[in-house]
Structures are given as C-alpha cells and as structure tokens.
Amino acid sequence: MASATLPAGLLDALRQAGRVVFLTGSGVSAESGVPTFRDALTGLWSRFRPEELATPEAFRRDPQLVWDWYRERRRQVAAVMPNPAHHAIAALQAWLPETLLVTQNVDGLHQRAGSADTVEFHGNLFSNRCRACGHEAPQLDPEIAAPPPCPDCGELMGPGVVWFGEAIPGEALQRAWRGAAEADVLLAVGTSGLVTPAAALPEVARQAGARVAEINLHPTPLSAQADFVVTGPAALSLPAMVAALIKKSP
Ligand code: BV8
Ligand code: ZN
C-alpha cells in the first residue's frame, strides 16, 4: 500500500512542537463509511441541501422530517467503526506533549478511537437538546422514532448538534480559539473549510505564528493558508505520520 509522502518540514515541526491542534472535518470519518456532510443527503433527503435541513427553521417547520434524517445518520454511525485516521490521531495525541482535538464532526468516532477530551465544535448526534429551555440529554438509542418532549418544558427536543444559524457552544468556541492562538502546529484534516467559524481556526493559528498543515483529498480554501499540504486519504497519511514520528523515534 503506497504510503503518503509527508513533507520533512512538517515532521520536523511536529517533533519540535509543544502544542499541536487537530481540526477535523467529515473527511476523517469518510473511510469509516460515514458520508461526508456534503454527501450526507441521499435518498429521501437528496432534494435538500444540508443548509436547508440542519437548521432550527427546518425543525420548526417539519420536526419529523428533520428527526428522520438524524435518526438515519445515528443508525449509520452506530453501525460503523473508527478508521485508521481516528486511531492515528489518538496515537499522535498520546505521543505529542500537548494536543487539542477540535472536531466539526458529530459522530463521536474520535472518542470511540480513544481521543478523550475532544472539543465537539458542532455538538454530537448522540444527544438531544431543547431549543426552548436548553435542557440537554444523551440520546444513545438511535431508533427513537420521534422527537421526544422536553422533560422540563414539554417542547419537542431536537438532536444535540449545532445547526446553521445557531451559535457554537461557548466553552467549545473558547477552547478551540485559545488552542489555535497558542498552537505551534495546526493540522486541518478532512475539512472543506467552508463552514464558519470553524474554518477561521487555521488562520487564527497562522496569525499567531503556528505552522499549518492541511490533509485532504483535494485543495480547499484552507490550502492557501497552509505551510504544508498533504494530498491523499487521511486513513493513509495520518498512519504514515505515526510511522514516521513514533515508530522511528529513537
Ligand atoms: C454561526 C452539525 C452565528 C449539524 C454543522 C449565509 C447565511 C446564513 C449563515 C451563513 C451564511 N454564510 C455563513 C454563514 C454561517 C454558517 C456557515 O458557515 N454556513 C456555510 C454553509 C457557508 N455557520 C453557522 O451558521 C454556524 N453558526 O455562524 O452562528 C451566530 C452567532 C451568535 C448567535 C447566533 C448565531 C454554525 C455552523 C455549524 C453547522 N453545523 N454540523 C449536522 O451535522 O447535521 S456543519 C457541518 O458541515 C459539519 O459538521 C461539518 O462541519 C460541515 C461540513 O464541513 P466538513 O466537515 O468539511 O465536510 P464536507 O463534507 O464539507 O467536506 C469534507 C472534506 O473532507 C472535503 O474537503 C473532502 O475533500 C475531504 N475528504 C473526503 N474524504 C477524505 C477527505 N479528506 C481526507 N481523507 C479522506 N478520505
Ligand atoms: Zn425544554
């Protein structure tokens, strides 16, 4: 299996780094079989764009339709496993002196691969949130067929993700922003760099003097901000990074 060629400058930057931030998007989960966000709308929902369904307005207009989409996605995620990209990130986190993992993904696969303390910038599929009173509760059973009533106020609860037009949870935003501003290296992995404010994090890091690397199949708006661009599947390039740094370290 071809191994990804990693820029020597990136490996050196990682060996010398004190603080490394990982910013991941749905491309990290692609090789687990979770459709990337842009591809997530197939079948019944193929007539919608994500920005049309993943919104409070869509849920108010048709809670059952939106709930069904998330139930389908919960089922998909519950049926898959973390892939080598998730495991490689967990291994790098154990080897590097200090890391922060900020994920835009809502699938919980980083945590299942052993990455503790993950900043879930856009929430998590396996929780519910009441948008009327803020009550949150785990939603571990993907099969719940309809939005449950909030135990505190009786309004319908929706999935515990951050929809378009909703604010990023305060603690997640603060930890991610501070992490990027203090990073020595920021690795943007499998993200299209289209959704804000997550897409601003590499620039925050760069402005603060960090080296930025992008790992993606294709160029994205982030590529221009990157010191290093590693083209190829994350499930190849991240294990190659582990092999180069950890397996060979003296
Ligand atoms: C906010 C949870 C303000 C839900 C998500 C115009 C009108 C209205 C709003 C806006 C506007 N312009 C900008 C905005 C703001 C808006 C936004 O950015 N819109 C976009 C569409 C332009 N942002 C927001 O609304 C945010 N909130 O701004 O609040 C505010 C402030 C105070 C008070 C009130 C409000 C909230 C954004 C969060 C949206 N929720 N997810 C759910 O999952 O259902 S975002 C969702 O899309 C995903 O979580 C993910 O983060 C994002 C998609 O991005 P990616 O993860 O990058 O996935 P994508 O499919 O796009 O790309 C995959 C990449 O992987 C590709 O590059 C591909 O090449 C690569 N890849 C594929 N396979 C591999 C790979 N790479 C490596 N290896 C592989 N194997
Ligand atoms: Zn409530």
Image (cartoon, rainbow, N blue to C red):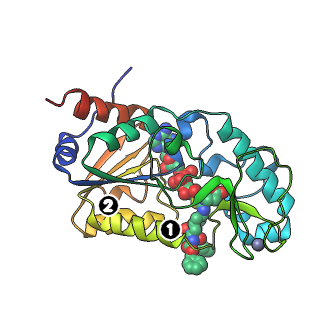
Q: Is residue 63 left or right of residue 94?
A: right
> In the displayed image of the protein, which residue is found farthest to the front?
152
Sequence-first disc among 2 and 1: 1
Where in the image, quadrant-wise, is ligand 2 located? bottom right
Residue 240 point in image, percent of width and height:
32, 31
Q: Which label number is shown at residue 70?
A: none
- Residue 62 to residue 143: above or below: below
Q: Residues within 10 Å of mark 1 (few under 14, many from 20)?
A: few
Look at the image and tell me in which quarter the C terminus lies: top left
Closest to the observer: 236 or 161?
A: 161
> In the displayed image of the protein, which residue is found farthest to the top?
1
Which residue is drawn at the image coordinates 27% and 60% (left, top)?
Answer: 183
Residue 186 point in image, percent of width and height:
31, 55
Label 2, ligand 1: CB separation under 8 Å: no
Q: Is residue 75 left or right of residue 206?
A: right
Label 1, ligand 1: CB separation under 8 Å: yes
The residue that mark 1 highlights is 196
Q: Are marks 2 and 1 in contact (CB under 8 Å)?
A: no
Type of amino acid under label 1: Thr
Residue 132 point in image, percent of width and height:
75, 76
Look at the numbered disc 1 and give the secondary structure of its residue: loop
How many angstroms separate mark 2 from mark 1 (CA)? 15 Å
Type of amino acid under label 2: Gln
- Residue 197 to residue 101: above or below: below
Q: Which label number is shown at residue 225?
A: 2
